[in-house]
Image (spheres, rainbow, N blue to C red):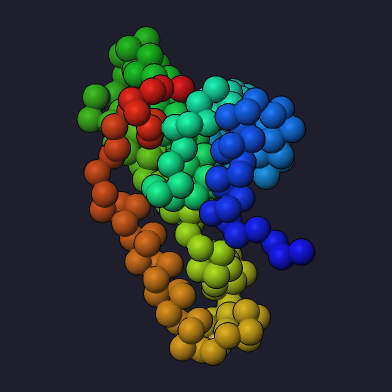
Amino acid sequence: MAKDTPLRWDRRMQQRLARGEAAALGELYDRFASLVHSLAHRVLDDDEAADRITREVFGYVWENPDVFDPKQGSMRSWIAKLARVQAVNRLRQLETAAHRASGEGSTEELEQRIREASAAARADYIVTSMPAPLRAALDLAYFQRRDYRQTAADLGVTEDEARRRLRLGLQLLSSANTRPLEGSSPPGNGRSL
């Protein structure tokens, strides 16, 4: 039996969630909980807060499976975006409250910290959302310190293909710092988490 394509899996998962299949939520959680937690932790630098964001994101997905639109991207990408937006919103709330309580630092410094955390989370989101071949090439080249020749050999592709994947991956990552900070509401029909 052939393995389902990601798009087919996404649609089936959405249908199962819409029917209220608890097993579908468990499967989705097993597949993406570490992604959500790591994105939230990247922004908030707090395990408990990341745990809370993880619960909120999966609660939102469970209650609103119809908000997912396969035409806008994969379920993985949608869940990663929910996590990033929720974590940045939580950071903004926490930092604003801490700023008010302490009276230290300027509003500009506060906004700069939030922008930096958002850019880092956006970069993580972009990496997790890019196709697996690009992620694999970036992982080999930047985290495992392989040059493009070693990357090509490890992936079993030509050197030209390895360079193309690395170049495209870097172009996608460069958009993390060039796009404006997105609004505070999560994607999908104006509903919030």
Q: Quadrant of the N terminus?
A: bottom right
Q: Quadrant of residue 101?
A: top left
**Looking at the image, which is closer to me, 56 or 14?**
14
Q: Quadrant of residue 50?
A: top right
In the rendered structure, the answer to whether residue 38 lies left or right of residue 73 reads: right
Is residue 98 visible to the viewer in this orientation of the structure?
yes
Residue 131 picture location, percent across and down: 51, 63
Residue 193 picture location, percent across and down: 46, 22
Q: Residue at x 54, y 54 (%)?
A: 7
Q: Does residue 153 sit above or below 110 in this rendering?
A: below
In the rendered structure, the answer to whether residue 112 lies left or right of residue 156 reads: left
In the rendered structure, the answer to whether residue 184 lies left or right of residue 81 reads: left
Q: Residue at x 64, y 35 (%)?
A: 16
Q: Does residue 115 sit above or below 107 in this rendering?
A: below
**Looking at the image, which is closer to me, 106 or 56?**
56
Residue 100 picture location, percent across and down: 32, 12
**Looking at the image, which is closer to me, 16 or 151?**
16
Number of callouts in the render? 0
Point out the residue furthest to the right here: 1
Residue 173 picture location, percent across and down: 39, 59
Q: Residue at x 38, y 40 (%)?
A: 118
Is residue 150 visible to the viewer in this orientation of the structure?
no
In the rendered structure, the answer to whether residue 89 lies left or right of residue 158 reads: left
Q: Does residue 16 sit above or below 76 in this rendering?
A: above
Q: Does residue 140 sit above or below 27 in this rendering?
A: below
Point out the residue furthest to the top here: 101
